[in-house]
Image: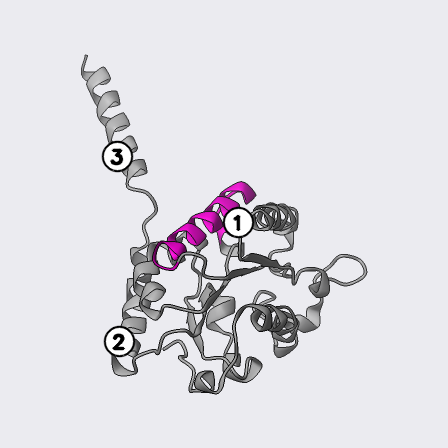
């Protein structure tokens, strides 16, 4: 009887822990830093929000890469897709963006998520973003193939294919495929696109992303003199 009681207690504890869902608290300092930056320098509405993981956070040339648009960098390094969704009320909704560019997914796969989970997490992000702004244009930059995560390449390709298919069935959701240009003739990531860690990108890598994002922005966001203002970088 005592053994049965212990087992039932463990089951209840396990269910309760699972029901709580992922713990996003590790990013609280990052989110508070964004909020402090917003308080010190309020962000005007109708900018282009770049949100996601470290590849967004380290994109320091947004202002010069996308002249004519007010860009907002809200990338926080190491984050998963569902982290951006969890904090959307604090680092997305307040800006009322004219468009959203998302990059995340390789951390998710590295942390054990399946390609299907990554697709579903992106779908959840889109749903969350459109609670406040129905129809806001959203672009997903495909998960990059990198030297450091070469073992993940089959899952990266699968996740990208799933997100592409899902995006094509949505209105104003785009899949921007940067992966082919980042691979050589043998299907391996090009070394010159990556820093020494084999994961984060050099300016040459970002140039390939700009080539995909810029035409999409031109089709979905009207550039104007009003948007030629100082951008909102990550703190």
- Alpha carbon distance from label 3 to label 1: 25 Å
First in sequence, mark 3 or 2: give its number: 3
Q: Residue at x 56, y 68 (%)?
A: 200
Name the colouring of the figure: one colour
Using the image as rendered, state which of residue 8 and residue 141 is in the foreground. 141
First in sequence, mark 2 or 1: give its number: 2
- Return the x and y of residue 169 as percentages of the image width and height: 58, 46
* Label 3: few (<14), some (14–19) or many (≥20) C-alpha neighbours in 10 Å: few
Name, please, the residue furthest toward the top.
1
Residue picked out by circle 3: 16
- Alpha carbon distance from label 3 to label 2: 34 Å
Task: Report the quarter where the N terminus lies.
Answer: top left
Using the image as rendered, state which of residue 74 and residue 230 is in the foreground. 230
**Disc on res. 36:** 2
Would you say the magenta stretch is mainly helix, strand or loop? Answer: helix
First in sequence, mark 3 or 1: give its number: 3
In this picture, residue 19 sits left or right of residue 176:
left
């Amino acid at each position: 009887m005592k053994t049965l009681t212990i087992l039932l207690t463990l089951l209840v504890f396990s269910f309760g822990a699972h029901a709580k869902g992922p713990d996003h608290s590790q990013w609280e300092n990052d989110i508070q830093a964004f909020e402090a930056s917003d308080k010190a320098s309020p962000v005007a509405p109708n900018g282009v929000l770049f949100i996601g993981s470290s590849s967004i956070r380290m994109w320091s040339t947004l202002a010069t890469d996308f002249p004519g648009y007010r860009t907002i960098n809200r990338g926080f390094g190491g984050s998963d897709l569902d982290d951006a969704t969890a904090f959307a009320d604090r680092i997305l909704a307040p800006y009322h963006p004219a468009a959203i560019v998302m990059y995340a997914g390789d951390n998710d796969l590295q942390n054990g998520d399946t390609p299907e989970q990554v697709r579903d997490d992106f779908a959840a992000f889109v749903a969350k973003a459109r609670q406040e702004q129905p129809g806001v244009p959203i672009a997903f930059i495909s998960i990059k193939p990198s030297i450091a995560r070469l073992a993940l390449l089959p899952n990266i390709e699968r996740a990208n294919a799933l997100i592409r298919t899902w995006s094509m069935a949505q209105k104003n959701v785009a899949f921007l495929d940067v992966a082919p240009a980042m691979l050589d003739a043998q299907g391996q990531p090009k070394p010159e696109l990556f820093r020494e860690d084999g994961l984060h990108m050099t300016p040459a890598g970002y140039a390939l992303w700009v080539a995909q994002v810029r035409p999409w922005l031109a089709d979905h966001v009207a550039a104007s003199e009003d948007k030629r203002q100082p951008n909102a970088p990550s703190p």
